[in-house]
Amino acid sequence: MIVQGIYNLDILIDNLSLFKAPDTVFIKGDIYEAIMNPVPTCSLELIIPLSWFDNRTIADGTLITFEFKSEILNLNERCYFRVFNIEEVQLSQKNATVKLNGVLDFYKGYTPGNDINMYGNSSDVFQKIASI
């Protein structure tokens, strides 16, 4: 999508371009950051064909990528977010209107928790930590 004749914007969910996905309609997208809330967040509103969900899901932790390119400004940037809230889903016969929110993706923020879990009762866990 060309923005203001300068920027080429692409938005990907789970590595699928919203603008190249057949029958997907982009309604609105925002990226927020403020002094009172310094962690960047994003929101998207889309109309997605139900067949889109045959190959992927949108759930907590799903990757959202904003790609900004501009030859005029010599710009090639990506911003990564992760879904943290699905605000609304409205279903029709062939489509789903989805409003979702994302939070900035950061190093090791979305690793699988079960890889480092300790198993056993709490006294066993504390004993294991104390022996390290």
Image (cartoon, rainbow, N blue to C red):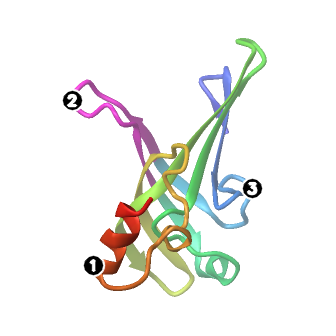
Give the mark nearer the N terminus: 2 vs 1: 2
**Residue on which disc 2 sits:** 36
Percent position (x, y) of residue 36? 21, 29
Closer to viewer: mark 3 or mark 1: 1
**Residue on which disc 3 sits:** 20
Percent position (x, y) of residue 73? 70, 12
**Distance between mark 3 and mark 1 Cα atoms:** 53 Å
Is residue 42 a member of the stretch shown in magenta?
yes
How many numbered discs sit on the rendered protein?
3
Q: Amino acid at mark 3?
A: Lys
Nearest the viewer among 47 and 58 is 58
Quadrant housing residue 48: bottom right
* In the image, farthest residue toward the left: 36
What label does residue 123 carry, if any?
Answer: 1
- Secondary structure under tag 2 reads loop
* In the image, farthest residue toward the top: 73
**Distance between mark 2 and mark 1 Cα atoms:** 40 Å
Closer to viewer: mark 2 or mark 1: 1
Nearest the viewer among 24 and 62 is 62
Give the mark nearer the N terminus: 2 vs 3: 3
| Image position of 74 (left or right of 65) | right
Within 10 Å of disc 2 (Cα), the crowding (few <14, some 14-19, many 20+) is few
Quadrant housing residue 100: bottom left
Nearest the viewer among 69 and 123 is 123
Determine whether 61 is above or below 94 in the image: above
Nearest the viewer among 42 and 10 is 42
